[in-house]
Image (cartoon, grey):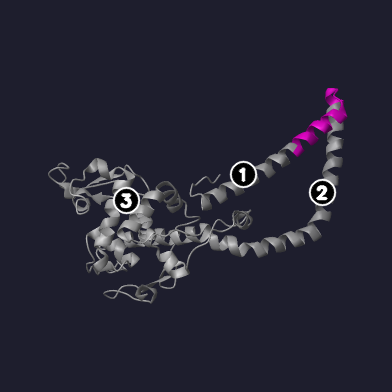
Amino acid sequence: MRIARLHSIWGSVEWRLTKQGIEVDGQIPRTRGYPATVSRIWKDYKVEILGAAQEFNVPVELIIATIATESGGNASALRKEPGYKSDRSTPHRISAGLMQTLISTARMWRSDIVRADLLQPAGSIYAGTSYIAFQRKHTSFDPPLVAAAYNAGGVYKQTGASNRWKTRQYPIGTGKHADRFVQWYNDVFALFELEGYAHAAPSQYVDMRGSGRATDRAKVEKDLTGKSRTIEGAKSSTFWAKLQAFFGAIFGVPAAGATVIDIVTDTKQKTQTIGTTFGLDNNLIFAVLGAVAIGTAIMIWYNNRKVVKARVEDSISGKNVDL
């Protein structure tokens, strides 16, 4: 695959497609934390994305990344460009829906399409995906070029000092659009790494890694428990967590036991003082304080379980439910 080799265009930064996504200058750009946005998009519009990918033979990752870049997954997104008068007279000045396709561009797919059609997820996804397919002769489905062509109507040279990609995109003179797109695109690879990918639709993830297989839910939960919210961090932190637990068991338990005995003794002395002062039963006060301490410990344990469960849902189900 040509795009799997380091390449550039018009003196741009070098990039290539890897098993982790697009590598740029030796880095795999990602958004921070777990890929919550692309997870949500994949969950909410999976059927439409797979259908469009199969119909137009476009990799699903390009569709998801375009949705994330253009609207963040907002099906009601609407943008009127300078010079807009009406949908009828200036359809080339208004973009609607998940993939923010111009009405005039969407009519390359279906001549009778109107704004209301693009505000329906399926209409927007099919129209936008058909345009990505149309641009294939210029992009070869190379992700940064797909981003530029979708944003600027084609792959054109633009050599601004702030544009490391050297392709025209908006804002003119910057590479911000392709930068965002590549981050979302790599987030999709990260998501598929967690949940696996076993669909028949075209996929650059599958091209690079072979058929995906869903990660065991228990394994994901184990990796996430109390660890970093980055995928690589979750994987690499298991060893250190075990090491800390080992030394904690050896040195921490005796110290903790001594501390508890200290606290209990001190608490008993204080409850005696309180009981004497207010005429209350000392044992009752001590029992209430003990119940509060045990209840607090249970609440902390329960909340930790909820946090772990939320992180698993965030990474697998596609819904950002982190607490």
Circle 2: is it few (<14), some (14-19), or many (20+) Cα within 10 Å? Answer: few
> Do callouts 3 and 2 mark residues in contact (Cβ within 8 Å)?
no
**Label number found at residue 125:** 3
Q: Secondary structure at mark 2?
A: helix
Q: How many marks?
A: 3
Compared with 140, 131 (above or below) is above
Q: Secondary structure at mark 1?
A: helix
Q: Quadrant of residue 303?
A: top right
Circle 1: is it few (<14), some (14-19), or many (20+) Cα within 10 Å? Answer: some
Furthest toward the left, the residue is: 89
Q: Is residue 98 left or right of residue 95?
A: right
The x, y position of residue 261, in whole percent, is: 86, 46
Does residue 124 appear in the picture of this structure?
A: yes
* First of labels 1, 2 by sequence position: 2
Q: Is residue 146 left or right of residue 265?
A: left
Q: Which residues are magenta?
A: 276-294
**Label number found at residue 259:** 2
Q: Secondary structure at mark 3?
A: helix
Q: Is residue 282 magenta?
A: yes
Compared with 322, 2 (above or below) is below
- Identify which residue is drawn at 38% across, 58% down: 60
- Identify which residue is drawn at 28% across, 54% down: 128
* First of labels 3, 2 by sequence position: 3
Residue named by callout 1: 306
Q: Which residue type does callout 3 highlight?
A: Ile
Q: Quadrant of residue 283?
A: top right
